Amino acid sequence: MKTRNALFTDLYQLTMAQTYFDQGLHDAQADFYWHFRNNPFHGGYSVFCGSHDLARILADFRFDQTDIDYLAGLTDPTGAALFSKDFLNYLTKMELGLRIELPREGELVFPYEPLCKVEGPLLQAQLVETLILNTLNFETLIATKAARICAAAEGRPVAEFGLRRAQGQNGGDAASYAACVGGCASTSNLQAGAIYQLPVSGTHAHSLVMSFKDELTAFRAYVKSYPRGAILLVDTYDVASGIANAITVAHEMEKRGERLAGIRIDSGDLAWLSKQARQALDAAGLSYVKITVSNNLDEYTISSLLGEQGATIDSFGVGTKLATAFDEPALSGIYKLSRIRRPSEEWQPVLKLTAQLQKSTLPGDLDLLRYYDAAGEMIGDLVFDRSQTTTDQPQPAYIIDPFNELRQKDLSKGTGQRILMPLAQSAKEAPLDVARQLEHLGESNRRLLNPHSYPVGLDRKLHQTRDQLLHMHRPRP
């Protein structure tokens, strides 16, 4: 079935678009931005991902005749056509003219930062909302989960193989890509490997062992087909006998000038079994044979295995809990209007105000700077309004927490760096090395349990503008 990028949206995006069209606002200039409200998994950071897919999808964004025919057939509750012929005719001729800025793949990001800035005709910027939310929310979520898992693995390779339990085919491909952006060394997903040029890896399943008369015969058959890089799954029947059979095969391979790459354990007490395996392999003169484990792993299990349990594990295979973001399956990302220039008017900052201050938005031509101290550690991010400054870095570099005016921080002794870049450039750049990015983040922000919140705040002028709009829309008694 053909994927219809223009129809991959919510109905209300089109009904709003027709309202803009009917009122002559479709070509009004507007700024929208994407941000999220909380780091997922109770963590202290998130990993941005999605620009590659977003650029690819938007490059093919158009309404073809089949799309228009479908929209023309939609009706309101009275049976009248939902969309006018003039509006549908406009859609057939529309070409996107949006300027989009966002971070590089793999950039560390934090709540309430403007992370995808969209500027252009109001109608067009509205129509791409669902695509942006769907792409960035999911891929950022999975990249963040992968980064947490890889950090827990302490430099040991992590292979992603959650495709069989991923959320559908498209979700599986996107999850595999995002997992590799987050730090995974490889994926089992061949389609994602082909689409994104990712390293692929795999071992074998229990069914291979069960298809032969015994385990030893199965192992011999597998290494005959793959004399280089073979990893034997040793827990089909009994791990101890599986390790013994793997040792037998490894010695046979040595006589042929070959080497067994490793064994995999997929059940049981992984710490205890890995120690037993390492002892047996070393005693057999096979210290080069690596041990990989799988079985419903996540960052907490891996941290425990390598920490208090002292497991002797060389690499990990992580599936379900990574590809599905098992413990928090959705990112709290939103897409909101921050300013508008109606026909024959000047730019006007706007914001959404609700009963919850944490759900209010930011007004203006938003931008983001990250500050580093002399040692290269991240010390805070500053959100500002480009229209309120004549320099790339507002002065003074002073941030105010958007929800607690008493929390403020002076960043003036640090060095600021721009985070947002044009979509085409971000999509073209290779993803950042997340492990190296994390070296610049404070240890208290990186820890798995109860991390310290990273400082993100508004510069003084933006804070004042937001307060003025707050009081204008909700006057003080």
Image: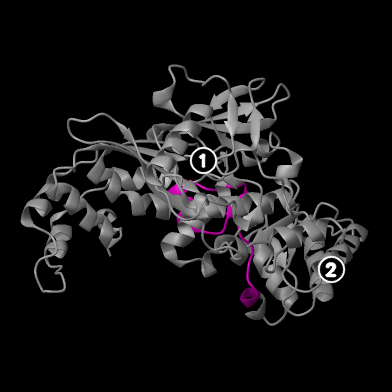
Instruction: From the viewer's side, name the closer residue of 61 and 26.
Output: 26
Q: Is residue 201 magenta?
A: yes
Q: Where's residue 380, x and y in %? A: 63, 33
The structure residue drawn at horizontal position 44% and vertical position 53%, both measured from the top left corner, is 354
Q: Nearer the viewer, residue 350 or 277?
A: 350
Estimate the x, y position of residue 429 in percent, counting from the top left. 48, 33
Answer few, some or many: residues within 10 Å of disc 2's Cα (few below 14, many 20 plus, some between 14 and 19).
many
Q: At 70% across and 30% down in the image, what residue appears?
A: 377
Quadrant in which the N terminus is drawn: bottom left
The image's mark for residue 113 is 1
Q: Quadrant of residue 218?
A: bottom right
Amino acid under label 1?
Glu
Image color mode = one colour
Identify which residue is drawn at 49% across, 36% down. Answer: 103
Q: Tell me if residue 420 can be seen.
A: no
Q: Which residues are magenta?
A: 182-208
Q: Which residue is disc 2 drawn over?
A: 273
Q: Amino acid at mark 2?
A: Leu
Asked if the magenta segment contains residue 58, the reply would be no
Residue 206 in the image: x percent, y percent?
65, 75
